[in-house]
Image: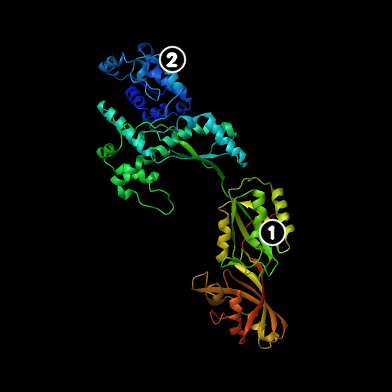
Amino acid sequence: MFALTEKNRSIAQLLLNTGTCPRCVFRFCCVGSQASYRHPYKDLLRELHEFLEYNKEKEDTFCCEIADPPGKRIRLENMGEGAENLNQNGALQQTPVTDDADVAMEISTPKVCNVCLGILQEFCEIDFVKKVCQKVNSAEYQFTSFVFSVSLPPQLSVREHAAWLLVKEEMRKQGLSLAKEDIVQLKETYKWIIHPLFSEELGVPADGKSLFEVSVVFAHPETDEDCHFLATVCPDCFKPAKNKQSVFTRMAIIKALDKIKEEDFRKHFPCPPSSPKNICAALEIQCTNGAIFVAGRYNKYSRNLPQTPWIIDGERKLESSVEELISEHLMTAFKADSFNFSSSGREDVDVRTLGSGRPFAIELVNPHRIHFTAMEMKELQQKINNSSDKIKVQDLQLVTREAIGHMKEGEEEKTKTYSALIWTDKAIQKEDIALLDDMKELKIDQKTPLRVLHRRPLAVRSRVIHTMKSEYIDDHHFRLHLKTQAGTYIKEFVHGDFGRTKPNIGFLLKRTADILELDVESVDVDWPPTLND
């Protein structure tokens, strides 16, 4: 059954006469059936002609309710004008039937819609869909569904507003009204049409929650200046923004259209909008995959390896880092554009991380490959471990974005265990350091260390040393095993940082103390889950 009824006749005729395409006619007639928009464009145009030309015999076929027919005087005046009154969009200028050959010629070469600028014409056809899908397939992404996004020229809002004013005026003559929000949105209509075509061509369903996005950006330079008058009438709606190339954003234009008076709008912009010469252009066709997150634990065995690239004043200090040794293999395997590395705390360049390792997570941005079996992840882990003797990775696995929160919680809330090799200026005996073993839940205050003051704010942080166990080596050396609150600066706890950490080992032993070596023995965060070998 055709989507329009007799009550839509005058509006449909008016819009077609002024250069509006059939799908936009449906939108302004508030047709909510998705299937109605999906018919081929030429079929829709032909059916609209038939609807507007129908005679009494077709009345029951095309109408559900009967409204007053168009005025007889208008029909009689137009009876003799013939086929030359077909408008530029293939629409009839009058209700009577015209020559079939003329109609066919106009249908075969439709002109650009004065409202959607061709979005609901050429860009709803299978040729355009194939062009987009060809680009998607050539990018070699893995995906099981897709979400489609479209960026429309902002001036479309101005043209739609002008068409709405035209239709509203016509309906007012009939004692009817049309709220702007009742018009079916152009972007929604486009997706109704395009989703099934993409699904069929790509072989996967459309899903609003899909991580794989296909996006198209449309532009229409010919009508770019359509919205410029709004900046004069409503200047407060258009304010420059750092991240916007133009002040004429869709939201700014909508805000101005809500504010401008109807008479002021009509002074500056034609109602109906004029017909353009050229169709919109698909400026960009892009596809992106949502980020994939990989987590695990790493051990660091080198005392000359930073966690992240060590660059000072643009100069690289060391050739590699934990981050790079891990991520370079993940980037290759997942075919990602970039990555972001995070971990549960960090160790200094000269500190080793032993035991079960430090939890880490890597966000892989726009990965082309997203499906990995447990065995493939294990092989990837082995590849990382074979590439360097400076690090080792374990429990490598795919995780969700939400799960990474468990790791960040542990940075401040959990405990960490360290082993420190300490030197003292005065000779020591076992009895001198035994007092450390008896100290439990020792509270210390640490002013931001001098060595990190360039990147961290000045503050005094209270921390707890839960337990200490000393191991005598010789007159000037001993090893201290500590379990501390996460976030404790161990080096400063040993040497005092010129009195910025109180109390400290030097103060407790009543002598100068310094740290020679430091190892992280455990980071007590129960994440990510341990995997069976």
Outermost residue on the bottom side: it is 426
- Pointer 1 local density, CA inside 10 Å: few below 14, some 14–19, many at least 20: many
What residue sits 61% from the left and 39% below the top? 138
In the rendering, at what x and y percent does residue 417 appear? 64, 70
> Eyeballing the image, is 413 above or below 135?
below
Q: How is the image coloured?
A: rainbow
Q: First in sequence: mark 2 or mark 1?
A: 2
Residue 210 visible to an observer of this rendering: no
The label nearer to you, 2 versus 1, is 2
Q: Which of the two residues, 474 or 224, is positioned nearer the viewer here? A: 224
491 left or right, relative to 78 = right
- Mark 2 secondary-structure assignment: helix
Residue 405 visible to an observer of this rendering: yes
What residue sits 66% from the left and 88% below the top? 426
User: How many callouts does the rendering have?
Assistant: 2
In the rendering, at what x and y percent does residue 231 appear? 32, 46
In the rendering, at what x and y percent does residue 151 appear? 46, 41
In the rendering, at what x and y percent does residue 68 appear? 29, 19
Tag 1: residue type?
Answer: Val
- Pointer 2 local density, CA inside 10 Å: few below 14, some 14–19, many at least 20: few
- Residue tagged 2: 101
The N terminus lies in which quarter of the figure? top left
> Eyeballing the image, is 178 above or below 499?
above
Q: Which of the two residues, 41 or 274, is positioned nearer the viewer here? A: 274
Tag 2: residue type?
Answer: Ala
242 left or right, relative to 214 = left
- Residue tagged 1: 393
Q: Quadrant of residue 88?
A: top left
